[in-house]
Each structure stands twice: as structure tokens, then as C-alpha cells.
Image (cartoon, rainbow, N blue to C red):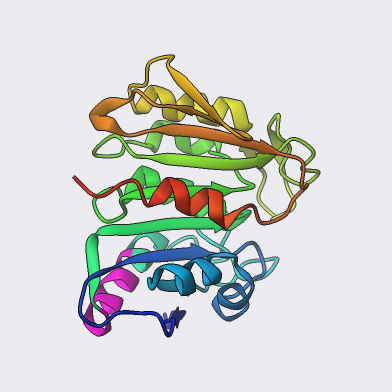
Amino acid sequence: MSRSYNLYVPSSYPTNKRVPLIVRFHGLGGSGSSEVTSTGYKGIADQEGLILVAATGASGPSGNAWNVGPCCTSDKNVDDVAFAKAIVEEVKKVANIDTARVYATGFSMGGGMTHYLACHASDVFAAFAPEAFDLLKENVNQCNPGRAVPILAQRASNDSLVKYAGGQDCLTGTCINFLGAVATNDVWKQKNGCTNTTKTDGQCVINTQCTNGVETGLCTNTIGHAPASATIGWNFLKKFTLP
């Protein structure tokens, strides 16, 4: 299968030092080309001189999608974890990437892909910032990252598509069951060995005492089903490196 991604190199990219890499995943029906121009992370790349990649999902019943276990690509054999890792390897060949500072983020189903990578690719990605999607009940038992993973989810309490409280959804052709924003955060707190110590930062509540210094957080906004703040995501991601 031929797969593609869009690579954005800002004019501020310094050729004399290693820089972070952000891999961004689009929502259902999106594409890498549209995502790289519309995501707020493009401005972050300009500001920070880092590299941004926006990947394109494989075909699904409702458009380009990501294989996150029980859904959502037409071909269930699509290995999007391997695809994400292959992107990182390709970009390392053409850009001066700091391999300890590779990050995953995404909106809607791309947020689902970000959660999925937190479960299955903690050896490559240092931290994760999903938006507008939760863990799926079907995936929790198979989610066994090799280490504690820094993760900050941004969710809208008035999201009419991916309900904040969770529940079943069949819009993709395959019924899936969202845990809900709070329950998803609870799963990550458990997997990351977090204590009950938290800090509040604007709309975010972050557990600050987790295994190996990672943090686990949930930011609650009221923007509906829409891409969340890249600034909030990046300010969290950049604090972490691969151990």
C-alpha cells in the first residue's frame, strides 16, 4: 500500500542543531495536505523552528481514517502504528531531528490515533496531545505501553459528536464505545501510576506526580467538536523527552 504524509519545514528551521518533530493526525475524512495548512501547530513550527508532519490516513467508509483497533479503515490490516514509526524514520533521513523529542498529536479520529500510539508506540514518541477523542473500551485491555507516557487530552464538554461522557457511536460504519473524557483520563492516571496530586492550569487539571516524572492531564473547553489549542498542547509536549 502506498502511504503519504506532508512535511512542513519552516524558514526558522536551524540546520546546525537537532530539532523536535511533531506528527499530527487529521480527523475522519481529512488529509495530510489540509491538516498541515490548517493546524495551529504550523504556527508553533514557525515560532520554534521545529519540523511538522501531517500524515494521511488510509481509506475508510467515511473517508480517510485511522486503524485504531475496532475501526475505522476499510482494510483492517492497515498498520498505522508501523506507518507512524516509518514516517519518523523517513524524516530523520532528511532533517536534523532530535529523536528524544518526537511528539504525537491529533484531532477527532486523529486524537484517537494519538491515544493509540500512546498505547503502542511509546518507544518512539516522547509525549502525546490528543484532541476531541477518547480511549475506546475495546482497546483498554490491549493498551500496555512500555513505560509511563506523558499525555494531555483536550476535550469539549459540549462536543456533540464525541460526547464528553462517552458512549456508543456507529457513524463510522463500525460501532465503537468511547470511555468518555474523565474515564479516559482515569485510565491513563492508573497506567501512569499517578497520585492524586494535581495542579490547575487554566482549563487543564494535570496530575503532576506520576511514574518517572511524567504528567497526565485533561483540559475541558466549550468549543464543541473542533481542533483545540495547539499552544496548550505544545506547552505540555515540549516538557518531555524520551527516557
Was residue 92 drawn as part of the magenta stretch in this picture?
Answer: yes
Residue closer to the observer: 187 or 197: 197
- Determine which quarter of the picture holds residue 85: bottom left
The quadrant the C terminus occupies is: top left
- Residue 57 visible in this rendered orientation of the protein: no
Q: Residue at x 37, y 21 (%)?
A: 194
Residue 181 position, x and y percent, is 62, 32
Vertical position of residue 233 compared to residue 206: above or below: below
Vertical position of residue 231 compared to residue 136: above or below: below
Q: Which residue is drawn at 40% across and 22% down?
A: 190
Main SS, magenta region, reads helix
Give the extent of the magenta segment: 85-95
Q: In this view, does 242 lie to the left or right of 118?
A: left
Was residue 125 drawn as part of the magenta stretch in this picture?
Answer: no
Q: Residue at x 42, y 62 (%)?
A: 80
Vertical position of residue 218 compared to residue 106: above or below: above
The quadrant the N terminus occupies is: bottom left
The tally of labels here is 0
Q: Is residue 24 left or right of residue 174?
A: left
Residue closer to the observer: 237 or 35: 237
Residue 101 position, x and y percent, is 28, 58
Q: Residue furthest top?
A: 196
- Residue 229 visible in this rendered orientation of the protein: yes
Residue 151 position, x and y percent, is 43, 40
Q: In this view, does 166 lie to the left or right of 115?
A: right
Residue 163 position, x and y percent, is 73, 37
Q: Residue at x 34, y 72 (%)?
A: 87
